[in-house]
Image (cartoon, rainbow, N blue to C red):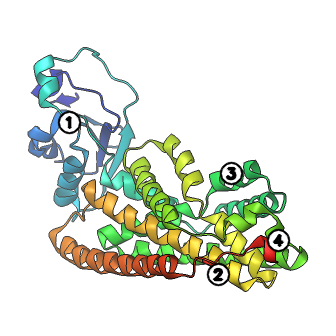
Amino acid sequence: MPACCPRISTTYTRGMAERLVKLYLEGENDEEITRKLPGDHIFGVWSDRLGDGTLEVTILPRPGHNDDVLHWLEDHLGSRNGYRVALLPIVASLPREVDEEEQQEEKSPERISQEELYQDVSGNAQLSRVYLVLLLLSAVVAAAGMLRNDPAVIIGAMVIAPLLGPNVALSLATTLGDAKLARQAISVLVVGVAVTLLLSIPVGMLFNNLLGSPEVAARTQVDLANIAIALAAGSAAVLSYTTGVPAAMIGVMVAVALLPPLVSFGMLLGGGLWAPALGALLLFAVNIICVNLAGVATFLAQGITPNRWFEAQAAQRATRTAIAIWITLLAVLIGIIVLADPATHLRLDLQTQ
């Protein structure tokens, strides 16, 4: 018979980040786990023995305590074999009515669980055939849009945005001190940049008067407003991941625009236009640095930390080092933007060419 804890009759507030935890255990005396679960973090527990002898435990965490429950399970089950934990989203729940006193006590969760976040972010930083195809398609669309001076087509390339995933993964890896995820994110990002340049440089060699397109010329210009936009977009990208609101990513993809400046750089490089190519490269670098810097800051503000204390110490050192590097690079770029000759400012005066 299923076992249910006595607290399960409590009404709870449904929030955007609520999840149902499913635990599967292999063993004869695993029912003990249902009595040891931290009652202050959960509303209820159900358990049942499946036909193959596996114990299925369903746990309903309190809003905002998904991480607490998952960390508790990891601490108590991490050293044993034969278990699996799954996290399921709650689309709707009954009863709808919420006791006013309890509603004041319970705070709606502000983000999804850390494990779920890690899976989402790392899954978007995989070097796969799908990623490469999306990258090529995005580069082709961006190049065609800039050559035709068609902003709508360029926005289509921004929406595909294959380079955003590796950058968010790099921010998360920096926050957690996860060297494996950092290497994965960097390798995917480097391959993405290389593939984009291999496509865009020959395009620049084939077409003349690239700067006759205002869309190309616009991406050779960098100012402090670009820094503000990229910082805001980087923070918004992380928030869209941590709160589980993927629809917000569309606006982020368009705002941060990582691929069009890179495509512009490749085409200008192929066309032998070195000065404006440097401007496009500077814009791409500003976006990369700002997205990562804002991403790390937002992850920290959201309470994303390593699960174990010894991992936390290493992560703190890695995070401080990475933030110092990002800030230094950003300061250098700001210096280049501010101190550059306003007459050139890494831009090309179209009327004098």
Query: How far is the residue under mark 3 from the one under mark 4?
Result: 19 Å
Mark 1 or 3, nearer chain start: 1
Image: 290 above or below 336: above
Query: How far is the residue under mark 4 from the one under mark 1?
Result: 58 Å
Amino acid on which the number 2 mark rests in the picture: Leu
Inspect this view and state whether residue 253 appears. Answer: yes
- Provide the residue designation for mark 4: 210
**Dots 4 and 1: beta carbons under 8 Å?**
no
Mark 3 or 4, nearer chain start: 3
- Provide the residue designation for mark 2: 278
Which type of secondary structure does the marked residue at label 2 adopt?
helix
Where's residue 141, x and y in %?
Answer: 77, 58
Q: Quadrant of residue 195?
A: bottom right
Q: Which mark is residue 62?
A: 1
Q: Which is in the foreground here, disc 2 or disc 1? A: 2
Query: How far is the residue under mark 2 from the one under mark 3?
Result: 23 Å
For the residue pair 8 and 126, the one nearer the viewer reads as 126
Inspect this view and state whether residue 54 appears. Answer: no
Q: Which is in the foreground here, disc 2 or disc 3? A: 2
- Provide the residue designation for mark 3: 155
Query: How far is the residue under mark 2 from the one under mark 4?
Result: 15 Å
Mark 4 or 1, nearer chain start: 1
Q: Which is in the foreground here, disc 3 or disc 4? A: 4
